[in-house]
Amino acid sequence: MTEQIAWIAVDWGTSNLRAWGIGPAGAVVATAGSDQGMGKLAPQEFPAALMAVANQLALPDEPVDVVICGMAGARQGWLEAPYLEAPTDLIALGQGAVHPNMPDERLRVSILPGVCQREGGENVMRGEETQLLGLAVTAPTYAGLVCMPGTHSKWARLEGTRIAGFSTAMTGELFELLKTHSVLRHSLAGDVNGPERDGGFLAGAQDGLDEPEKLLGQLFEVRASALLSGRTPDWCAGYLSGLLIGTEIAANRNQIGTDPVPLIGSATLCALYARVLAMTGAAGRVVDSTEVVLAGLKAARASIA
Amino acid sequence: MTEQIAWIAVDWGTSNLRAWGIGPAGAVVATAGSDQGMGKLAPQEFPAALMAVANQLALPDEPVDVVICGMAGARQGWLEAPYLEAPTDLIALGQGAVHPNMPDERLRVSILPGVCQREGGENVMRGEETQLLGLAVTAPTYAGLVCMPGTHSKWARLEGTRIAGFSTAMTGELFELLKTHSVLRHSLAGDVNGPERDGGFLAGAQDGLDEPEKLLGQLFEVRASALLSGRTPDWCAGYLSGLLIGTEIAANRNQIGTDPVPLIGSATLCALYARVLAMTGAAGRVVDSTEVVLAGLKAARASIA
């Protein structure tokens, strides 16, 4: 017999959605997901997409809360949840939730807001704020930078549950663009995961850390080193990855304190960031991203009006 | 009656080729061109592509020299012309020329080498070295940086006809990639040449000059400013262009002396670079790129074996 579900936690991204059935004691009792990300849906298609996932969780007869973070609340999503403005205390995240129309009354839906920044560089996030809240409630004394590597890496300054400010680096997207569409693709065509990837990564990371202001020039050296030194696709891919991550970390280096920097993201990517942080004399601490998003959704649920 | 041709100058790029018929007194007496760039041709297709252009110039009966710079000498071109290695005196550029098989004996073909750099950052150029030689012979006392804006901008350190070293910035290619394929394309969709482009350009250039090490982060602010401040596509396009050019110039700023920096490239692009150079307190001097490539081909011809 399936364990009873008290509420449903949902992380609704651009390309997919993940849902967890949470039991009365707060434990995950069932998981579900689909590829119906925000990018594939018109507003009126969200209820059916949610219902399809909720039905995988064996719904009880009585209505349950569904707490959603991420792109469902974007302007082009299901229903816009206006941004909170940083600096702000994330503990009140639920107060900014919006409640879209849900034809099936067994689901009481709340969509959490994202966070924007207007002073000190305009910026936006949707989804990461919930992970940050989850990190903050599980490590309430932490004050400092949090790094969230990915397509658009976020660097947030956290003080307990308060987000002081943040920035976004287009590192992951730029890697994919350069690999796929730029002149560098010629140097990365082949087995990019061969034995020389690691050496390339370390060389690129060092160059990025040493001269982050020269990124536009160092990118071309990938091509030149393939032409002149016969660098292999795996070395070139490693170099490009290291160069971009090194440049990203260098730009944030002067704000890194003595505590290890929490890293929230895919395990592979977090391990790479931790290596480059170590090259600067700092340290990274890999955080389980599912754990923090669940902790964040739970904490936000408490403040939903 | 068409004036007599003494030799033919050719700039063979990746996407097209340009040819000039040069009279006995050294003046251009006819021009021709085609879209048969290196990128479209297999090695055995170059002779016919050259002949098609040469026939537009009204060839004399006796054989004429054809001096070619650019991508025809690349490994994937007509016949590889191995790189000279910087630092080197470009006055001897012709000594490195190669002579591919040309079925029609009326054309005696020489392809000039490019220049590579192995120490101080691996790098390559093909075509720009001939423009640099042309600049040097027309302004023989100049010593300092030369900037060649474009898809892959080159920055060369010239001392008379000697090239001391150079770097390449992927500025133009990155602008196109980001505009076409990245998340920023949403913010640049529409009229990118409207009245706000100029203001965006100046704001982006200032940000690039001020914090070139933060490029990965500043790129995303294009998107955030469209979402939060309703920035228009023309403003966003201007900002992105200014940000990239400002970042490129900042990386070379400490090598700029008191003389105006010669700028070789498209008139539009050179004007933008001159504006950003002026923001740093330096100056640019726009050089006619056709004049210098012709002067370079002429000077190189004198040293062909």
Image: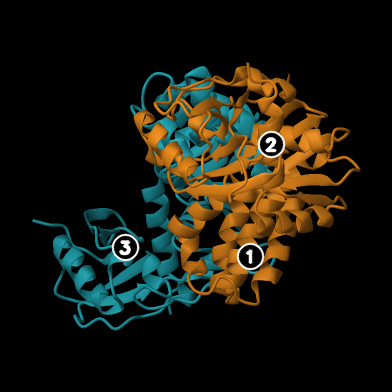
Chain colours: A orange, B cyan
Q: Write the residue at 65% across / 29% down.
A: B281
Amino acid type of the residue that numbered disc 2 sits on in the rendered structure: Pro
Q: Are marks 3 and 2 on the same chain?
A: no
> Measuring 29% from the left and 75% from the top, which residue is drawn there?
B42
Which amino acid, mark 3? Ala
- Badge 1 and badge 3 both on one subunit: no
Query: Mark 2: which secondary structure?
Result: loop
Q: Residues within 10 Å of mark 3 (few under 14, many from 20)?
A: many
Q: Position of residue A209 (x, y in %)?
A: 75, 52
| Residue A42, horizontal then vertical, whole percent | 35, 33
Q: Image quarter for residue B11?
A: bottom left
Instruction: Give the CA separation, mark 1 to mark 3.
Output: 42 Å
Q: Which mark is residue A238?
A: 1
**3D distance between C-alphas at marks 3 and 2:** 82 Å
Tag of residue B9: 3
Badge 2 is on which residue? A24
Q: Amino acid at mark 1?
A: Gly
**Image location (x, y in percent) of residue A18:** 54, 45
> Foreground: B45 or A135?
A135
Q: Position of residue A125 (x, y in %)?
A: 60, 31
Q: In this image, A255 relative to B74: left or right?
A: right
Front: mark 2 or 1: 2
* Residues at marks 2 and 1, CA–CA distance in whole angstroms: 46 Å
Query: Considering only vertical position in the picture, is A117 above or below A129?
Result: above
Local crowd size for mark 2, using a 10 Å CA cut-off: few (<14), some (14–19), many (≥20):
few
